[in-house]
Amino acid sequence: MRTDLWRSSVVVIALLLALPVVTVLSFLLQPSGEVWRHLVATVLADYITNSLLLMIGVGCGTLLLGVTTAWLTSRYRFPGARLFSWALLLPLAMPAYIIAYTYTGMLDFSGPLQSALRDQFGWSYGDYWFPEIRSIGGAVTMLSLVLYPYVYLLVRAAFLEQSLGAIEVSRSLGAGPWRTFLQVALPLARPAVITGLSLALMETLADFGTVQYFGVDTFTTGIFRTWFGLGDSAAAAQLSALLLLFLFSLILLERWSRRQARYHQSGQRWRTPPRQPLSRGRGIVALILCLLPLLFGFLLPAGQLLIWAWRSASHSVDLQFVTLTLNSLALAAAAALLTLLLALLLAYGRRLRGGWAVHSSLQIAGLGYAVPGTVIAVGVMLPFAWIDNTLDGWLRSQFGISSGLLLSGTLVALLFAYAVRFLAVSLNAVEGGLGRIRPTMDDAARSLGLRPLQVLRQIHFPLLRGTALTALLLVFVDVLKELPATLILRPFNFNTLAVRAYELAADERLADAAPAALMIVVAGIGPVILLSRAIARERCPESPSLLTNRRSDHAA
Amino acid sequence: MLLELDQIRVGYATTEVVRGVSLTLAEGEIGALLGPSGCGKTTLLRAIAGFEPLRSGVVRLAGRDLSREQWQLPPEQRGVGMVFQDFALFPHLNVSDNIGFGLRHWSRSDRRERVLRLLALVGLSAYGEAWPHQLSGGQQQRIALARALAPRPQLLLLDEPFSGLDVELREGLAREVREILRQEGIGALMVTHDQLEAFAMADRIGVVEQGSLRQWATGYDLYHYPADRFVADFIGQGVFLPGRVSGAGEVMTELGLLLGRMPTGCRVGCAVEVLLRPDDLIDIGVDDTERSDAVEVRVLERLFRGAEFLYTVALPSGTRLLCLTHSHHNYPPGSTIWVRPDAGQVAIFPVSVTD
């Protein structure tokens, strides 16, 4: 009886969490309206072209940065190699929209770099050529700079896992270091490369802030504009559905590469190759190659933010800013707690009574993490608005009272959207932690005289505390950074750090946006520290799991 | 009686895993359940511990009902300790706290004393402050044992207690555990798939197959007087030698007249088979060939096992037998040697198509 209650509540929660995606996908089957035909005739081709260009560009960029740094830090000893092995993850803390506006401030006409050039050489406007940062190329650069750590982390782990044998055999058969890298090491790491790449590309497709700021028309900006500019929710949902198809193909690619990975990894624990020392000259080259992504992906923009924040602190850090911060923190904490509770409920449901229904429910519930915030927002708004209107209409006709907006336009909608998007993060951490509590431990505690609830308190609670905190932290930070869903779903006059930073930046008040942006970046360092601790322990198979599982284990 | 199982049945949705098992274990006795993997022996153990409900039957401990049809005492109220295959030590507690886990209602000083005594008993006095992950497999095993023994259970259940350990470690530890159980005067029932382990530990051994208890007897009786062909096959090695009943308790075979207990329904002239263990055949080399019961056999295979040789030999008719000899009796395959049966009472099985 009790387990049936568990099972049905698990299924109901999963279905609720699947609601946005199902809603959006159902619009694929709807007859297309006038706005949709207009979109197809005018901008759809641009959206697709730009999205593809972004994917190709970011794909190349993250591969170049990620694989190079992974190879250097996993195989060679050079000054700072140890430091780089975790510091190269720091750009993960930098949301793309923040790095985008930071670089805009640094590189545009009135920015410090161009001003300095003009002063130095006595140029004036029009005398010289300077690359335009607000372009698709700029977006590719920004996204590559913050997304390469996905590739780096996974490929590095793969390189560390490769047996020394394969490398030594290759060398003994007469292949030099370059040929060994290209023909042995890289092909062996291919599943990791594809996984990292598809994660980076999913983020690229989900990005809203960067492309919106740079004026590059992609699906996410198109959805936003169709909804708020043209006021056509159906067409927005249809665009969303199309974007989802793009994403699902990436998920399939990623799943496929994971299956390949299973064949490649041997159960045996092989000797990891010792890092080879590099000559002085080559060591410096390696140092520079690793320093560049770190410098441009984190140190420079973070430094610039710090300077701006310092300068603008006196007038931009006021009571409003404090409210803003408290709003953000409270919202993120609430969302983190909510997802943790849901994750615990689902994970215990699976532990107590598995079965295919519960298992597939968990898979569906984890789907949200692959879905862009913009799409989730659309998928949440449509059904919630419908419920509100229906309820309101019914109450009016029956009792002559109005319920107003109960769901849409309230924090309920926002929290629900966060739960949909970030449940997989919590669920993964909790399931990992729960998996370490073997069922025999429960039995042992029972046979030593504990009642079931005492087992929960004395065994499960202390053992799950660490993973629960991890889950809370990860979701907390993800919610702090989240932009598009918050932008669309937040209640009227309710602002968060991310929204404020975005709005100020959009108004060209870059320095004023810096304090909020800086706080988000600082918070984002938390998960990076978690990851780097895993790396420091050098238990290579574990370091990537924290990151990849977040996105993909429950993604499809 | 300490433990009584009366016709217990355990099952999941559509499959019955334990099919009407009955056995008894006396105070201070150690029992073992032996069987191939998936035979239901672990489920049986978990039913006694209270982790699996019964479909029917009764589990009784020292005269008190633990489980009946539709009713069971929760595991924590049974006074039954359990040692798990994976030890299941609590990773967030150190060794002392693990051992003291079941002593929550004891006074602080009693608990401390009991923990120290158990640490000494398992020979790990220096490890009270250590963490489970810092211990070797054998040490973890001993702590798991100490933890289960701490609350002085009336009965201790051990689920494949040595299967996770190195072979060298197993034998010594099995002897140690037996000694500790004796000292504490605690009856125990263990599950294993290793018959040598069962022989080393247990006073009574049950052979389980497909959820049924085939035989519940001492190791000696299982080996020499198996109740049926499955037990005969499962325990030890041996071959079935065809023969014909020639009188009361007498079977005529190619090795001559063998004596044994007659299965019911076999009369003179019945075709039967006799279980012949490798040690039932004595190699008499070439010295004593004048004996009336000496038989000439040809060596087919030779397997050196350290202290002994195991030969596969063939009778003139081609029937194959196994023969165990001293490690000095080294005959190359193809050679001819003389053997004689020394079986005492052999196990006799009727020949039928189904059995």
Image: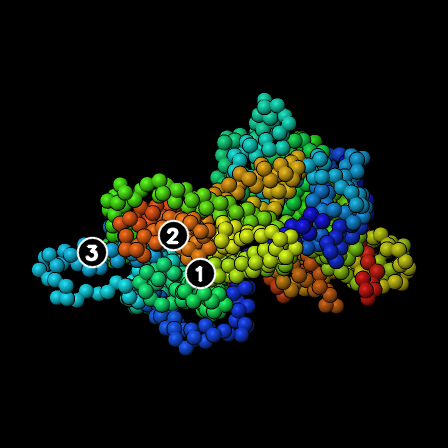
**Amino acid marked by disc 2:** Val
Relative image position of residue B287 (x, y in whole percent) = 69, 55
Left or right, residue B160 beside residue A522:
right
Q: Do the residues labelled 3 and 1 touch (CB within 8 Å)?
A: no
Q: Are marks 3 and 1 on the same chain?
A: yes
Q: Can residue A521 be seen in this view?
A: no
Q: Return the disc, 3 or 2, that comes first in the chain's sequence.
A: 3
Q: Quadrant of residue A47?
A: bottom left
Judged from this view, the residue extending furthest toward the left is: A122
B280 w.r.t. B84: above or below: below
Residue identified by numbered label 1: A374
Residue identified by numbered label 2: A499
Q: Return the disc, 3 or 1, that comes first in the chain's sequence.
A: 3
Q: How far apart are marks 2 and 1 (CA)?
A: 14 Å
Judged from this view, the residue extending furthest toward the bottom is: A41
**Amino acid marked by disc 1:** Thr
**Amino acid marked by disc 3:** Gly
Q: Pointer 1: residues within 10 angstroms few (<14), some, or many (20+)? A: many
- In the foreground, B334 or A182: A182
Total residue callouts: 3
Tell me which residue sits at (58%, 37%) in the image: A457
Tell me which residue sits at (47%, 74%) in the image: A34
Q: How far apart are marks 3 and 1 (CA)?
A: 31 Å
Residue identified by numbered label 3: A111
Instruction: Provide the chain ID for the residue under circle 3.
Output: A
- Label 1's element? helix
Q: Distance between the residues labelled 3 and 2?
A: 24 Å
